[in-house]
Image (cartoon, coloured by chain):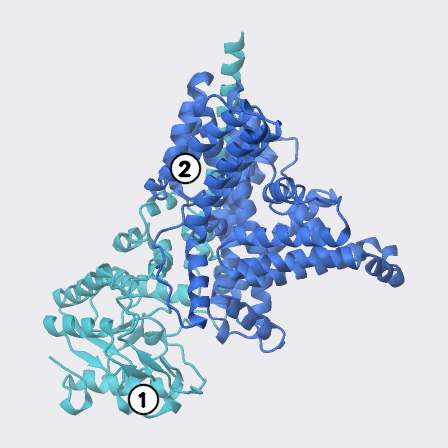
Chain colours: A blue, B cyan
Amino acid sequence: MLFNSFHFVFFFLIVTGGYFSIPYTKRWMWLLAASCYFYMAFVPVYILILAFTIIIDYFAGIYIERSEGKRRKLFLVSSLVANIGILCFFKYFNFFNDNISAMLGIFEFQNPVGNLSILLPIGLSFHTFQAMSYTIEVYRGNQQAERHFGIYALYVMFYPQLVAGPIERPQNLLHQFRQKIDFDGSRVFSGLKLMLWGLFKKIVVADRLGIFVDNAYNYHAQQSGAALALATIFFSFQVYCDFSAYSDIARGSARVMGFDLMKNFNRPNLSRSTAEFWKRWHISLSTWFKDYLYFPLGGNRVPMPRRYVNLMIVFLISGFWHGANWTFVIWGGINGLFLVMGLLFKKQADAFWKFTRLQKFPILYAAIHISITFLLISFSRIFFRSQTVEQAFAVIKKIFSFSGSIFKESAVMMLYSFFAIAFLMLVEMRNEYKLPAFTFSLRRSFWVRSTWYALLVILILLVGVYDGGQFIYFQF
Amino acid sequence: MEKILEANTYRSFILKLFVFIVIVAVVDISVGKLLEKAYFNQQQGEDALTTYAVKEVQSQMLVFGSSRAVNNFDPAVMENETGLSCFNAGRIGQSVLYHYAVLKTILKRYSPEVVVLSMDAGEFAKDAEDYDKLSSLLPYYNSHPEVRDMVHLKGPIEKIKLLSSIYPYNSLLLPIIKGNSINEQEKNAKGNGYISLQRTFPGPVETIDYTANRRQLDSVKINTYLSFIKECRQRGIKLYVVCPPYIVNPVGKNLSLQIAEKIAGDMGVPYFDLAYDEKFTSRKHLFADFRHLNLQGSKEFSKFISARISSDEVPDNTGIHNE
């Protein structure tokens, strides 16, 4: 069930209406049933995988809490092995098998093991990571083991963030399922507004840009370097709007019911360095890796060379988390390299900017930094968007040949695309730099605000793309 | 006390929500009306041509098809050759689903004497995009009930989307502005639906293997094609199904074209198969690209087809079959 579908609209209305109609002590049952339905709308049988990990982690949490010493660690490791094992089996089996086949092929051996013909369970990487954060936090003593099986199952399955995050932490979410949440009209409106803005980003911006991007990348051999460069820039906006739209709708729909999910994006396109970008992009995953991988590896408290290695490990694994393809590993590696280079050459970079005296012109200075960061991130995304490593290199080669004119899907389509980006960036810049509001979303008058949001609905109806399909991050 | 407060909260929320919905509805209807007026006032562009076909055309001969109809059939040439007034009602990127809907709107007003339906190699292949493209019919949904069956093929919730007055004009704002911004000279110069291509095919001629990676067939499209033929037969319209030339080296036979020919044959409809006819494929300079003729090519092709229609008999040595 896609957030941008009518199926979801009906589902949301029924679930929210039901949620406020029943006594709060019984609401967890309603939400759990709704979440099961939501998940089963994709591939019903895969709910068994979820059930399996929920049972394992539920008991693991209790036993971790009850145990001490090595036994405590043993329960944690068992839980992690079960979760990672399922993830590896469903997501990475074919990838590893293909690579083994390729290696054996070099020595003219044939791999006797065939590939699995299974669909990747939707949102597997997301709910697996959320489940792991629970057992780790219980192990660390930051979270009490949840005794109520239904509430724990709801923590993993809560439908707004089940298939594409935000990847929640037990400390933030679990206790909210026990709170008595009264109906609050202003909170409901606030949630609906967030959902509407998410819908705008998905339908008006992401899916519109996706038309050009898909045409350019799917037929890259026929495209000019200029067209592919533009498609790469467009893809940066597309992937941001697509994923942040999902997070906005998830957070909005949770907020309507009184739940507060963590913020997943903080205007990453306005970052002034790649290090800053990773603090603003997919925050729930970045902090997951920071808390559960980077810090255990030593974090910033290790000698610099080791820190570089740690950063590379985190980013390579993060890339691999996104997909079972070398393109994602390389994408992660490039971003890791950006951070390492940033640390390595920090002094030289500072000296260079001092030499240019551009700091005297703060707006220009910021604009240059934002542009460089955006271009670097966009460059890395060539690997993210390409189907194969070969395709990515072919695209890069074409882009740097600086050849040809920009392919036009149609002049109208291009105009819509630029309008969508301009509107998005104006709103983001207004929020980032607290500029005077050019929209009426913050006005005190209910009528003015309502008219503004009505216009946003009209804009979605007028220039939205209704055949855009699913969210990019669903595949992960 | 708590219950009273809660009831007030609900009441205030519902009131605000109601006001918001009313505002959305008012703006939607107002903007929708404006767009409707502007849409049907267009004097140029493909929407204006569709409106002309749906509402006004009275030509004796009509051509239907995708870009291979729009770029290959020149009504001016066909009029000269056959003596019948002609209009090209084709639309770029559209499939038989769209053509059938437009045909039905026309048949509600009058019956042309001759209809030419242009075929593509992927005519009956399953392609979700062909259903998405039926959006071109949305502005006619309310005024022309004949298009509704085809519009509903877009999806089960299309009816709900159409509750909005703006939705039929989705993504049409800029084309509408363009279609309305013309000078007096251009006014009423919609054209006859034909768009010439000036370029020449640079080559090389590629090989297309129709036996490999065959796309799944779409039974809805095949049935619509059948309905198109039946509708013409019932009205006594002389229908010609034509496959214009491709400049490719084909391996095997194209399944869609085979089916189109078989059905036409079974229904007693003349089928002119010029897909790989040497009369055209041996002359690369007649093509704009591998699937479209250029200006010179389309004139020759239109003349050739017109001659066949005029004589309504097809010599055996051309590879064109007639029932």
User: Relative to the observer, which residue lies in front, A331 or A237?
Assistant: A331
Q: Residue A360: percent from the left, percent from the top?
A: 88, 55
Subunit of label 2 = A
Q: Is residue B255 toward the left or the right of residue A300 in the image?
A: left
Question: Where A414 falls versus B138 (above or below)?
Answer: below
Dot label at residue A11: none
Circle 1 SS class: helix
User: Relative to the observer, which residue lies in front, B47 or A325?
Assistant: A325
Circle 2 SS class: helix
Q: Residue B311: percent from the left, percent from the top?
A: 16, 86
- Residue B197 visible to the viewer: yes
Label 2: how many Cα within 10 Å (few below 14, some 14–19, many 20+): many
- Residue A14 visible to the viewer: no
Tell me which amino acid carries mark 2: Leu
Q: Residue at x 41, y 80 (%)?
A: B196
Quadrant hosting residue B295: bottom left
Tell me which amino acid carries mark 1: Thr
Q: Is residue B120 toward the left or the right of residue B165 in the image?
A: left
Residue that badge 2 annotates? A50
Q: Using the numbered discs, state the Cα–Cα distance from disc 2 to disc 1 in whole angstroms.
A: 59 Å
Q: Is residue B159 toward the left or the right of residue A57 in the image?
A: left
Q: Residue A125: percent from the left, percent from the top?
A: 49, 45
Q: Residue furthest front?
A: A70
